[in-house]
């Protein structure tokens, strides 16, 4: 047993050393698929490789700087997902693969206008011209758009996917939805935009007081009207005015039982259903939810890029929305379904556990509820 453990540890060290040596010595070379997979699956002894999330960021930066030697086919994408690749890393590989890096040399100004999205980040709580709001930063490359009158446009949706309706006519689209624009007229083809910003005043959301879960929808459009390309979407939380004061400390609960049904089918997908029986006090009339994430023995959370099965951190998450009508309220069977195909692990047997939490509707944690351990085998 000791020999087997020693060999396994030695193998891991060799893989990690090979990965780090390749990155350091061949820093100017594109990454191969084997290098990316090794980097994802090998836990390092440095801060930037200690967790799967940090390894994703570590590898993504090198992909963006040096590219990859392979194309992101559906088969390779699934293999990378199973190894723990985030949506951001997959997007970087898709953009910096050979099919993309070779394209600009063949593009002409007569090419159909398009763009490749690189990165998005947001500064919240900033002031511009004495107005409070948020500054949205977008990194992208525009193709076939030289001297084209266009806009970077940002629209906003509620948690149900409905675009916010404009009420004062100040920042609105042609369809009377809330939107903010910035003029765009590239002088080159292709044109690189490392940090193109647009400011959105909070007051222009035109929302009543409350805690809101919103999504920004970022697109390139023609000034004359019509879509060029959608760049990305991003979910965020927004508090307007005198929102109800939250007091997580006043919330109490008792979990009576948790259990799992395996090999069930829902909407044609095979998976497992987690059940939670509990009662809660202090949430009467409050939009809230039970959420469950899946954790490895290492403590790392499984990642997922599907909008239906992930949170804003890219972690695999399933949820049940509720608004208790009584205090206390009893929930005899809250069930949460996760398809097997969304559990991104490599082949073999895994000791996993559900991390079950009680959250407010916008994702803010109220309290941790319970862990439920289970075994999962990927054929």
Image: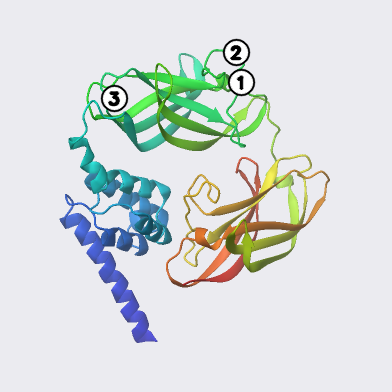
Mark nearer the N terminus (2 vs 1) = 2
Residue at the spot 32% in from the left edge and 47% down from the top edge: 94
Residue 345 at x, y = what percent? Answer: 45, 64
Instruction: Check whether the beta carbons of the residues at disc 2 and disc 3 lie within 8 A of each other.
Output: no
Mark 2 against mark 3, which lies toward the viewer?
3
- For label 1, the residue is 206
In the image, taking residue 143 as reference, residue 237 lies left or right, namely right
Residue 3 at x, y = what percent? Answer: 34, 85
Mark 3 against mark 1, which lies toward the viewer?
3
Q: Which mark is residue 168?
A: 2
- For label 3, the residue is 145
| Residue 32 placement: quadrant | bottom left
Relative vertical location of residue 231 with respect to residue 270 in this rendering, above or below:
above
Residue 108 at x, y = what percent? Answer: 21, 29
Distance in Å between CA atoms under marks 3 and 1? 33 Å
For label 3, the crowd category at 10 Å Cα-Cα, with few meaning under 14, some 14 to 19 and many 20 or more, is many
Element class at badge 2: loop
Residue at the spot 32% in from the left edge and 61% down from the top edge: 37
């Amino acid at each position: 047993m000791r020999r087997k453990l020693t060999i396994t540890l030695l193998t891991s060290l060799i893989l990690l050393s090979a990965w780090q040596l390749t990155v350091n010595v061949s820093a100017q070379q594109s990454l191969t698929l084997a290098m990316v997979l090794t980097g994802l699956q090998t836990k390092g002894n440095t801060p930037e490789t200690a967790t799967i999330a940090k390894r994703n960021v570590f590898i993504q930066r090198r992909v963006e700087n040096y590219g990859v030697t392979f194309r992101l086919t559906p088969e390779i994408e699934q293999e990378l997902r199973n190894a723990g690749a985030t949506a951001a890393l997959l997007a970087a590989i898709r953009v910096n693969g050979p099919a993309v890096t070779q394209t600009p040399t063949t593009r002409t100004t007569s090419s159909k206008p398009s763009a490749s999205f690189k990165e998005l980040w947001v500064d919240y709580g900033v002031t511009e011209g004495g107005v409070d709001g948020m500054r949205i930063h977008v990194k992208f490359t525009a193709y076939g758009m030289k001297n084209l009158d266009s806009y970077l446009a940002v629209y906003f949706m509620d948690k149900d996917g409905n675009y916010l309706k404009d009420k004062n006519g100040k920042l609105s689209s042609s369809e009377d939805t809330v939107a903010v624009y910035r003029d765009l007229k590239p002088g080159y083809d292709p044109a690189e935009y490392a940090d193109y910003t647009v400011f959105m005043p909070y007051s222009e959301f035109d929302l009543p007081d409350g805690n809101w879960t919103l999504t920004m929808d970022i697109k390139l459009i023609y000034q004359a009207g019509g879509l060029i390309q959608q760049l990305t979407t991003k979910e965020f939380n927004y508090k307007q005015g005198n929102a109800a004061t939250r007091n997580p400390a006043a919330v109490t609960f008792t979990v009576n039982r948790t259990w799992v049904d395996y090999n069930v089918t829902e909407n044609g997908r095979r998976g497992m259903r987690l059940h939670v029986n509990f009662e809660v006090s202090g949430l009467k009339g409050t939009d809230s939810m039970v959420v469950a994430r899946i954790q490895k023995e290492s403590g790392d959370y499984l990642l997922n890029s599907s909008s239906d099965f992930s949170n804003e951190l890219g972690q695999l998450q399933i949820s049940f929305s509720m608004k208790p009508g009584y205090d206390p309220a009893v929930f005899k069977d809250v069930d949460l379904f996760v398809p097997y195909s969304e559990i991104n692990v490599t082949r073999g047997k895994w000791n996993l556990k559900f991390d079950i939490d009680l959250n407010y509707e916008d994702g803010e944690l109220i309290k941790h509820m319970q862990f439920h351990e289970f075994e999962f085998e990927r054929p």
